[in-house]
Image (cartoon, grey):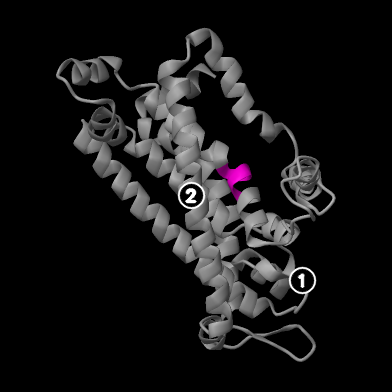
């Protein structure tokens, strides 16, 4: 053992390669190889028996841009954007309060409340929202008992139900990155702005918001990527009327048995996500350099 340690001390490049080997193996084996197979299948064709007919054509990609599917993409992207915006509006005050307003003795307990939903299966939590939003559910019963409405509202299997489920599921992914950045914020900067006569909104706009940009960017990317490819939430809360791109891909693989077309749509979605991640990383690095 001592001889091996001495070898790694003399050859640091082998030490670096050894530390990275596990992550690289996982990345190549469970991401790059399946992605390469997905790309290869996307150029194939579906035989009359539902099997793969290996060809080399772009018919699946041309079909993916038909108006019927463009409507699904548009619905997925605007709902993901709305989810990201709502998570930012709801998550920023929570993260700001936890990081700068709450005493240290309460921070751990309140952070635990943020992550408690992860202790339960997301599928079970989505079923719970079905119970809450159905015609005989909690929301309608409360509104009926208060005489706010005279007949149950149709909440389940609507875009509103999908939006509620997406915001509920993705909100912690916005709060935690923002909290990680805001807790490192120097309070003396805020005090200096107030001493110089800046009102609270000006202090927030010129000091707090720019310094929290890396966390806001990271949270937005996490929420948007998870929302645009969501499958369980639109399937259970939206029904067939609120199909998103994740449901489209699942239907092609499981129902239509058209793996080439499903692979083409999935690869296009993966490509869009990779472009967004690359752009967000560049923006985050730029924002970090400007702060430093």
Residue 11 place in picture, x, y as percent: 37, 30
Closer to the chain start, of discs 1 and 2, is 2
Q: How many marks can you see?
A: 2
| Secondary structure state at the residue bearing disc 2 | helix
Check contact, mark 1 vs mark 2: CB within 8 A: no
Side of 1 relative to 243 (left or right): left
* Residue toward you, 44 or 2: 44
* Residue toward you, 236 or 121: 236
Q: Residue furthest right?
A: 136
Q: Write down the residue under mark 1.
A: 254
Residue 137 place in picture, x, y as percent: 81, 47
User: What span is colored magenta in the figure?
Assistant: 166-170
Side of 32 relative to 274 (left or right): right
Q: Is residue 50 above or below residue 115?
A: below
Q: Write down the residue under mark 2.
A: 84
Q: Give the spatial CA distance, label 1 vs label 2.
A: 29 Å
């Amino acid at each position: 053992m001592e001889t091996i340690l001495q070898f790694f001390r003399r050859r640091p490049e082998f030490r670096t390669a050894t530390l990275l080997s596990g992550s690289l193996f996982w990345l190549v084996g469970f991401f790059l190889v399946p992605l390469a197979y997905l790309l290869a299948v996307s150029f194939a064709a579906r035989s009359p028996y539902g099997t793969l007919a290996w060809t080399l054509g772009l018919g699946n990609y041309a079909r993916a841009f038909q108006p019927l599917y463009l409507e699904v993409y548009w619905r997925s992207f605007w709902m993901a954007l709305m989810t990201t915006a709502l998570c930012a509006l709801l998550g920023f005050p929570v993260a700001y309060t936890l990081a700068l307003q709450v005493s240290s003795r309460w921070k751990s307990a309140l952070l635990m409340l943020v992550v408690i939903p992860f202790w339960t299966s997301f599928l079970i939590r989505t079923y719970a929202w079905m119970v809450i939003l159905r015609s005989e559910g909690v929301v309608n019963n409360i509104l009926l008992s208060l005489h706010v409405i005279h007949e149950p509202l149709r909440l389940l299997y609507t875009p509103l139900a999908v939006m509620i489920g997406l915001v509920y599921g993705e909100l912690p992914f916005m709060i935690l990155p923002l909290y990680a950045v805001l807790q490192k914020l120097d309070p003396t900067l805020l005090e200096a702005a107030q001493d110089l006569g800046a009102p609270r909104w000006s202090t927030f706009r010129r000091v707090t918001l720019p310094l929290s940009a890396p966390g806001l960017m990271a949270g937005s990317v996490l929420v948007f990527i998870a929302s645009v490819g969501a499958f369980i939430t639109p399937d259970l809360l939206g029904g067939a009327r609120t199909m998103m791109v994740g449901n489209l891909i699942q239907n092609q693989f499981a129902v239509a048995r058209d793996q080439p077309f499903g692979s083409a749509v999935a690869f296009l979605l993966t490509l869009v996500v990779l472009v967004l991640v690359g752009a967000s990383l560049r923006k985050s690095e730029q924002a970090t350099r400007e702060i430093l």
